[in-house]
Amino acid sequence: MVLSPKLRYVGSRLVTTMLVLVSATILLFSLTLFIPGNPAEVLLGPRATPEAVQAYSHIMGLDRPMLERLAIFLGNVLTGDLGRDVISGRPVLDLVLEVFPYTLTLTLASIGLAIVLGVPLGCYAATHPGSVLDQIGAVTSVAFIAMPNFVVAVFLVLIFSVWLHWLPVLGVGRDGGWGDAVLRLVLPAVSLALSWIGYIARLLRASLLEVLGEAHIRTARAYGVPERRIVYRNALKLAAIPTVAILGLGVGRLLGGAIFAEIVFARPGLGTLVYDAIAVRNYPVVQAAVLVVVAVFTVTNLLTDLTYLWLDPRLGRRLGEAR
Amino acid sequence: MRDAFTAVWRSPTGRIGLVLVVLVLLFSLAGPFVIPYEPNKLDVLHRFAGPTTVHWMGTDNLGRDLAVRMAIGGQIALTVALSTIGISLVGGTLLGIAAAYAPARIERVILVLFDVLSAFPPLIFALAIVALLGPGLDKVIFILAVTMVPHFGRIARAQTLSLKQAPFLDATRVLGASAARLVLVHVVPNIMGPLVVLASMDIPVVITLEAGLSFLGIGVPPPRASWGGLLHDGYTSLTQSPWPVTFAGLMLILATLGFTLFGEALRDAIDPKLRAAP
C-alpha cells in the first residue's frame, strides 16, 4: 500500500504521541516501585499498625505481582480512573478537573498577552530593521527570554505589592466578582508571558524579514501594491507560520511553567495541586496531575505539528522530496 | 576557537554576555575565599540586615551572610549546568553518530527514542521523579541530562550524515583505521562546532531548571545554598526584608542573561545556520 508522504507523517506523529503517553504512564507506575519503603506504610504514617498497613496494601493491590499491577494501572488510566486521593478518598481525576480550569485560564491569558504584545513588536521591528526601537527591542527580547519566570513573578510581587500597593496580588479572588478575578490574573499572566513576548517578537521579525525578501513580494511591489498591504496581507500570513508552531509548544511549556506562577501568587491550579501533594507524599495525586500535564503537552505538540502541515503546503512537498 | 572568542568579543551583545559570565564565574569561585563568613553560620541577632560594608548583600532569615551564600549558590548552579550538559552532550553525540552509521532499523529505534524523550516536559518530568523518589542533586542532574540527550543527538546525527560521504573518511578507512578511531579521531572533532554552540546555549536553560526545582524545594536540599532556594526563602520572608529576593533574583537574571548573550554570539560566530533552530 502506498501512502502519501503527508499521511505517513501524520501516522508517524500519531504513533509517537501514543508511545509517549504509554511510556509516561509506565514510567509513573514504575517510579512507585522505587519509593523507599512500602507506599502503604508511607501513606499511613509511623503510627500505623502492621494490620492496617497490610489491609491498605491489599486495597492498593500492592500484594499482587508487578506485571498484574502494571496492567491494572494501565487499564484504569485508559478508563479514566487515575486512583484515589489518599487523604480525602475522592477520585483524583475529580481533583484534577476541579483545578484545571484555573491553570488553563492562566495559560491562555499568558499566551493571549504574548500575542497581543509580541506580534506588533515583531512587525514593527521587521519593517524598521536597524532602527533604534528595533535595537532596543532586540536587547529586551533576549532579556525577557533569558529571565526565569519565577524570578519575574517574585519581582512583580515585590514591586507591585510590597512597594507600590497597586494591585491585589495573591489568590484568584473567588468572591470578588469578575473584575477582581481579572485584576488578580494580570501579574501572574505577565510573569509567564514575558519570555513569550520576546520569543514571538524575535521569531516573527526574523521570518517576516525572510519572507519580505522573497521573489513574490518583489513582484507585488513591482505591481505597485501598497507596502502596508504587502506586509500585513501577503507577508504576514506566510511569516506567521513558524510563530504559530512555537505557540503550540508554548501552551505545553506554559502549563509546566504555570506551577511557579501559581505558587508565587497563591492561586489554585494543577501546579499548586502537585506542589501540595508532594509535600505530604500524596502519590496518586502527583501521578494523576503529572499524567494530565504530560497528556496535554503531547497532544498540543501533535496538534501543533498537524496545524503546521495544514498551514504550510510547502512542508508537505518537502516531506515528499525527503523520501 | 580563538577566532570564535574574538568574534564574540566584537559583537556588542556578545561582549556584554562575556563580561557578565566572567563576573558571575569570578564571584562564585572567588567569593567564598574573599568573604569572611561561613555560608551556613547562623547569627540570629543580625538577621534580615540590609546591605552594609560588613554584609555586602545583607543577611537572611537566620542571619547567614547572603553574599557568601549567593557565591555558593553560583557554584552549585554551574556544577549542575556543566555536569548535566556534559552528560547529555556525550550521550547524545554517541547516540547520534550511532544512528547515522547504524542500519536503518536501529536508526529508527534511536530516532523514536529521541522523539519520546523530547516529548516529556523536563520540569514536570523532574517534578514527578523527585516527588516520588525524594530530592537530590544527582537525580536532578540525571533527569535534566536525559531530557536533553535528543537535543544533541539529532544535531550529531545530521552532522554525521553530511560528513559520512567525505572522501577523507574513506581514505582513513582504506588505510585501516578502526571504527572507534574513525569516530573519535575523525568524526567527533568535525561535528563538534554546532554541538558546542548548543551546549553553551543550554547552560542558561539548565540553570533556570535547577533554580526552578530548588525554588520548589525539590532540587538542592537545604541548608546548602542555591539561587532557587535563596529566592524561595527570601520570598517567604518578603515582608521582613526585600534583600534576599532582590539579590537572588539578580544573580539568576545576570547569569542567565550573560550565558544567553554569550551563547548567541558564539552561535553567530561558529555556525549561523543554527539560528533557524528554535
Image (cartoon, helix red, strand yellow):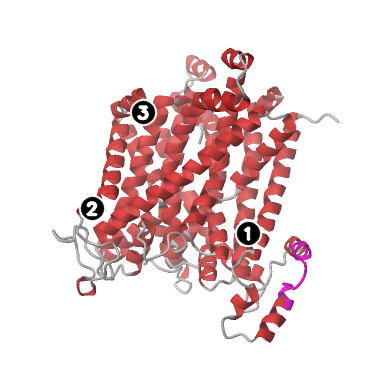
Q: Residue at x 47, y 23 (%)?
A: A212
Residue ID for mark 1: A292
Q: What element carries label 3?
A: loop
- The residue nearer to you, when weighing A218 against A133, is A133
Q: Residue B181 carries which label?
A: none
Q: Position of residue A193 (x, y in %)?
A: 44, 50
Q: Position of residue B200 (x, y in %)?
A: 42, 37
Q: Is mark 1 on a helix, strand or loop?
A: helix
Check disc 2: other Cα within 10 Å, few if <14, some if 14-19, many if 20+.
Answer: few
Chain assignment, label 3: A
Q: Distance between the residues labelled 2 and 3?
A: 50 Å
Q: Which region of the structure is painted magenta? A: A58-72
Q: Position of residue A68 (x, y in %)?
A: 79, 64
Residue ID for mark 2: B33
Q: Residue at x 30, y 36 (%)?
A: B18
Residue ID for mark 3: A128
- Can residue A40 be seen in this snapshot? yes
Q: Residue at x 45, y 46 (%)?
A: B83
Q: In this view, does B138 lie above or below B92?
A: below
Residue B180 left/right relative to A19: left
Check disc 1: other Cα within 10 Å, few if <14, some if 14-19, many if 20+.
Answer: some
